[in-house]
Image: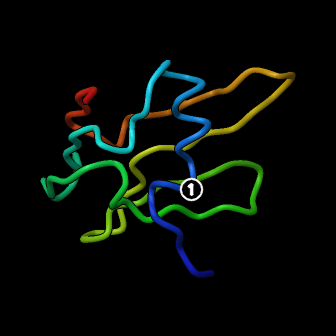
Amino acid sequence: MTPYDGNAIAGVLEEVFGHDMTAADCVCAECGRTGVVAEVAVYLGGPGAVARCRSCDNVLLVITERRAMYCVDLTGFSHLATP
């Protein structure tokens, strides 16, 4: 499966956080890679979206939607700062 970049989930993240998160600083909790959300590897097509670290393949975030509500797991980030 070919990954997209973080811009693929920009709309959902804006709905959840209330503003554009693609420029948000982030740090992988596994390897410590720093960057912005737009640089993560995003996989679509399952029951939700999965974002992984481009360095170590750690799962950074998972987004699913159920009954018009988003469920977001951000535990793969050690740091996520709004832009």
- Left or right of 82: which side holds 8? right
* Position of residue 45 measured from the top left corner of the image (x, y, whole percent): 75, 63
How many tags in the picture?
1
* Position of residue 30 measured from the top left corner of the image (x, y, whole percent): 22, 53
Quadrant in the rendering for residue 25: top left
Crowd tier of the residue under label 1, counting other residues whose Cα lies within 10 Å: few below 14, some 14–19, many 20 or above = some
* Position of residue 63 measured from the top left corner of the image (x, y, whole percent): 60, 39
Quadrant of the drawing holding the N terminus:
bottom right
Q: Is residue 14 above or below residue 2?
A: above
Q: Viewer-proximal residue, 34 or 5?
A: 5
**Label 1 SS:** helix
Going 77% across and 50% down the picture, which residue do you hit? 47
* Position of residue 48 measured from the top left corner of the image (x, y, whole percent): 70, 48
Quadrant of the drawing holding the C terminus:
top left
| Residue farthest along the bottom direction in this orientation | 1
Quadrant in the rendering for residue 8: bottom right
> Label 1, on which residue?
8
**Of the residues shown, which amino acid type is indicated by label 1?**
Ala
Going 75% across and 20% down the picture, which residue do you hit? 69
Going 41% across and 60% down the picture, which residue do you hit? 52
The image's colouring method is rainbow
Going 42% across and 54% down the picture, which residue do you hit? 59
Q: Is residue 78 above or below residue 67?
A: below
| Residue farthest along the right direction in this orientation | 67
